[in-house]
Amino acid sequence: GEYIQILNADDYLQKDKVIESIKCFNNNPQASYVFGDLYIINNNNNVLYAIKGDEDYAGKIKYWTPRINHPTVMAKKNIFEKYGLFDEKYKIAMDYEWLLRVHTNGEVGIYSEKIITYMQEGGQSSNYFHAMKEEYDISVNYGRPKIVVFVIYTFRFFRTNIRKLLEKFVNTNFLYAIRKGINKQIK
């Protein structure tokens, strides 16, 4: 085949996800990969919230993982052949390292809101501190200034831990409404 779809255990694709991804490639021949929105679901397959993909990811990817929601990514097979597979020394942020490697070499990703994947709440990506440590190391390994990356990740660490603390004491619907108002990538 021409394309490779990234899919993790406990994730599943919306029924027309593959078709929408191929349409996106056909409409954007410059695309090396396409991506979309990620719906986080609970054990009953109820959608808890959605994370909108970031069509303006290019300026952010150097320093942290923008919302290129990895379970939504479909890439051209030749991109994997040209730049290699995921680096397995990273246990959580291997997708970020691969996307940064591809981006650094001038490849382009295209966002489409019609591309949707569902991801089970929890899992390896929920080990936020370890994920942030790997992302920090990757950013620095790709030549980003340590102090800039440190400040960004320190801010993200505190922001996330404050949110997690609030989740223990405040109604989740109320918190979701606040998060949605602050972060335009939360649907």
Image (spheres, rainbow, N blue to C red):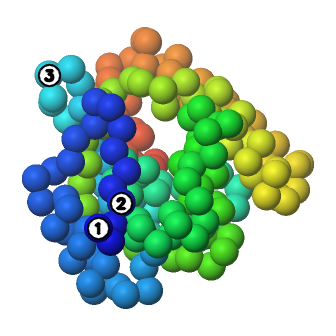
Residue at the image position 70 percent from the left and 61 percent from the top? 62
Give the residue type that dot 1 points to.
Gly
Helix or strand or loop: what does disc 2 sit on? strand
**Residue at the (26%, 48%) spot, across then down:** 117
Per the image, the residue denoted by label 3 is 44
Q: Are marks 3 and 1 in contact (CB under 8 Å)?
A: no
- Mark 3: give few (<14), some (14-19) or many (20+) Cα within 10 Å: few
Callouts 2 and 3 close, C-beta under 8 Å: no
Query: In front of the other: label 2 or label 1?
Result: 1
Identity of the residue furthest to the left in this view: 15
The reply to whether dot 2 and dot 1 touch (C-beta < 8 Å) is: yes
Q: Is residue 89 above or below residue 170?
A: below
Q: Quarter-wise, where is residue 137 in the image?
A: top right
Tally of numbered discs:
3
Q: Is residue 97 above or below residue 176?
A: below
Residue 36 in the image: state x and y as whole percent.
33, 60
Crowding near the residue tagged with mark 1, few <14, some 14–19, many ≥20 C-alpha atoms within 10 Å: few
Per the image, the residue denoted by label 2 is 4
Looking at the image, the residue that sits furthest to the top is: 169
**Which mark is nearer the camera, 2 or 3?**
2
Which residue carries the number 1 mark?
1
Q: Nearer the viewer, residue 151 or 128?
A: 128
Where on the picture, by quarter, is residue 142? Answer: bottom right
